[in-house]
Amino acid sequence: MPLYADIVLPLYQPTYTFEVAEGCALSEGDAVAVQFGVKAVYTGVVWRIHDSRPDAKRIKTISQKLYDQPLLSPRQMKFWEWIADYYMCTLGEVMRVALPALIKPKGADEEEFAREQFRPRTESFVRLLGALSLDERAKLERRAPRQYELLALLEQRGEVRRAECDPAAIVALRKKGVVEVVEREVESSAIEVDVSVLPTLSESQSRALEQIISDFDKVQTVLLRGVTGSGKTEIYMHLAAQTLAEGGDVLYLVPEIAMTSQLLARIRRVFGERVTPYHSKLTNLRRSEIFHRLGCSEGGELVLGTRSALFLPICNLRLIIVDEEHDSSYKQTEPAPRYQGRDAAVMLAYLNGAKVLLGSATPSIESYVRAATGKYREVVLSERYGGAQLPEVIISDTIRAAKRGERKSHFNKVLLDKIEERLERGEQVLLFQNRRGVSPFVACESCGWTARCPHCNVSLTLHGGGRLTCHYCGYNEPQPRRCPACKSAEVMPMGFGTEKVEQEIAALFPEARVARLDRDTLTSESACNRIVEAFERGETDILVGTQIITKGFDFSRVTLVGVLNADNLLNAPDYRASERAFQTIMQFAGRGGRGEMRGEVVIQTAEPEHPVLRQVARGDYESMACEQSAERNSFFYPPYSRIVAITMRYRNAEILHRAAKGLAEELRKRFSRRVLGPTIPPVDRVRGEHIVEIMLKIESGASFARARQILREVLKEVLSPKEYRNIVTICNVDAS
Ligand code: ADP
Ligand code: ZN
Ligand code: ZN
């Protein structure tokens, strides 16, 4: 009897059925090469083998298995299925993020495919060539900490994988003739952990570690709440060392790539080559190599990665660490699967019988509530390591300052005085503004006209050089001299972004060296490193930036951080606004005073009495979390409910609105008041497509699995008419 295999391909459809060639022994989880069209070849994954012939007239045969071993274990297959089911996407969409570059795009020819797949496994290594004079070393230590760090590492080990070194440091040291880069085959011999290099824990850290270990006997997930600088990283390392010593593998997740490179050096000092960094900026080849190597590893692996590392074949996973668990970067929004990395980590751990440690100074309300209800255990570290003090918070009223004439452009006098003080003392300053560009919009002062994008319903942002740019589609045009509506010459920039802050600070402090870090200056990883390194070396005095400067960075000479406009954080149109504002400002405050000197935080606001700012000033996480969770409870917001945000996009507004109305009506029949909308979002047209939204809110008591099932059925039914077929409909589960 012929056998058939349902194959998952990196395409939208769930599975495709092929006939299995006679004599080809396939099992579930195997990778296969399948032909599609005339010459295109894909990698597919065998999902199910059965004997029921599908209806189609002609069925292709499959004969080529790619590796001796299955590519996916049964546990990984379960994990993919959970992601697809929970986040409402197809297995093919999961495959696209889960498998690195094994997949050839449609159109790759067979020969090229084979070459890619079976290339010998060589890798680049950086090797130490010569020594530096003591003088040069001392200079390096002072001026170029990253180069120095790499040098020290090389002196210890002789050679290091190139993918794991700072690229700018390699270039610089190569120029000096100190290192060379060589290519060679990789050996997969295990390397011992040198536990003697683990830092000695303070008394409160040891207590926290012991509590975590004993809590793991009772629950799967522990939440470590420790103020910034309390040494959470040290606790993670101790726990990881213990897990590795017992023969388990560890997955250490961070929310952003920028943070992997910072942490890597620190973790390497203890765990050496055993640490494998994994994120989307590695080359495709490197990522496939890691995937294959882990798949046949004998254990003792420590992977440091971003959320996509959850899909790696870590065979003996015993511990997952989720650092900065509150960070919204853990949620993938585009494209599908729109998964929340932290929550997926908890599921992955469950499937593997592993433990999860969630860590943050400001845990998400979700985790806070789960800890409060006993689902997780919570361990608290309330002091900074070595008795360092948390920064002092100064809330500065922008309206009062303006009335008293104590405001220059966008800065209150308090902030300017403190900046001046820092400049005189040779200390550094970070300034945060959560908008980039010069001004978020330009408007005519006489008739009220504003510059808008022709393709999106959004105002254009003014950037340096007088260009107006759309942040949604990239459209840009020069700023008009005269108002196109009334011909007045009063076209003025309104509000301010990071570029404006940079310009104004440079004008107010001509002697200061000012730099900016935002999406516009962050053109590449090396551009980012250049800006950060110059600041680390003290070649810049003031660094202006968006959200990115609030996270993770560890600059020892920063003693002042300034929030230029807290109001647009506090008033974001989102039920999480207060939580997010608190987290962002507290994280940012944590960047200051990490060295010997105490830090100060100046927060400019028009609402100095805002309860969240009061909580920030007291560093009072408890009352913020308590208040927010009570509010969420009374309005049925997560974690007291689950939200599915349904977004629909289409060129024809009339058809779109009809479809959305029909969908909402049908959903209401099944879900009644749990359906909200359709509503028109603040930006209701992007790239010429109109947008509407419908929200589904399912309270915790009800079956969410059943709700998703009904939603799938209703979507299929309502959107089946021909005129609706090209409407793009996206379901974002646990959207925020
Ligand atoms: P967190 O992750 O909680 O913000 P870190 O782990 O970055 O804190 O620790 C803050 C600083 O204190 C770091 O510079 C770290 O090296 C230092 N530190 C923390 N704990 C110890 C320890 N037990 N021994 C030596 N240094 C420590
Ligand atoms: Zn006008
Ligand atoms: Zn646009």
Image: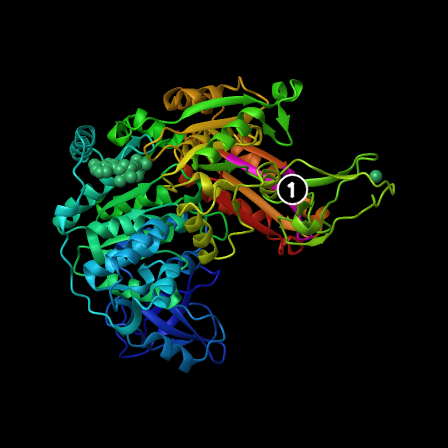
In the picture, measured across the screen, residue 225 lies left or right of residue 450, that is left
Residue 106: give x, y in percent of width and height: 49, 72
Q: Is residue 684 magenta?
A: yes
542 shown above or below 265? above
406 shown above or below 41? above
Q: Residues within 10 Å of mark 1 (few under 14, many from 20)?
A: some
Secondary structure state at the residue bearing disc 1: loop
In the picture, measured across the screen, residue 225 lies left or right of residue 197, that is right
Residue 77 seen in render = no
| Magenta part, dominant SS | strand
Residue farthest toward the right in the current orientation of the protein:
487
Quadrant of the drawing holding the N terminus: bottom left
Seen from the viewer's position, the closer of residues 328 and 585 is 585
In the picture, measured across the screen, residue 425 lies left or right of residue 315, that is right
Residue 602: give x, y in percent of width and height: 49, 27
| Quarter of the rendering containing residue 52 | bottom left
Seen from the viewer's position, the closer of residues 646 and 204 is 204
Residue farthest toward the front in the current orientation of the protein:
135
State how many labels appear: 1
| Quarter of the rendering containing residue 329 | top left
Residue 718: give x, y in percent of width and height: 59, 47
Q: Is residue 277 magenta?
A: no
Residue 537: give x, y in percent of width and height: 40, 48
| Ligand 2 image-quadrant field | top right
Q: Amino acid at mark 1?
A: Val
Q: Which residues are magenta?
A: 679-696
Seen from the viewer's position, the closer of residues 496 and 354 is 496
| Coloring applied to the structure | rainbow
Q: Residue at x 28, y 71 (%)?
A: 26
Disc 1: which residue: 683
Q: Residue at x 63, y 39 (%)?
A: 681
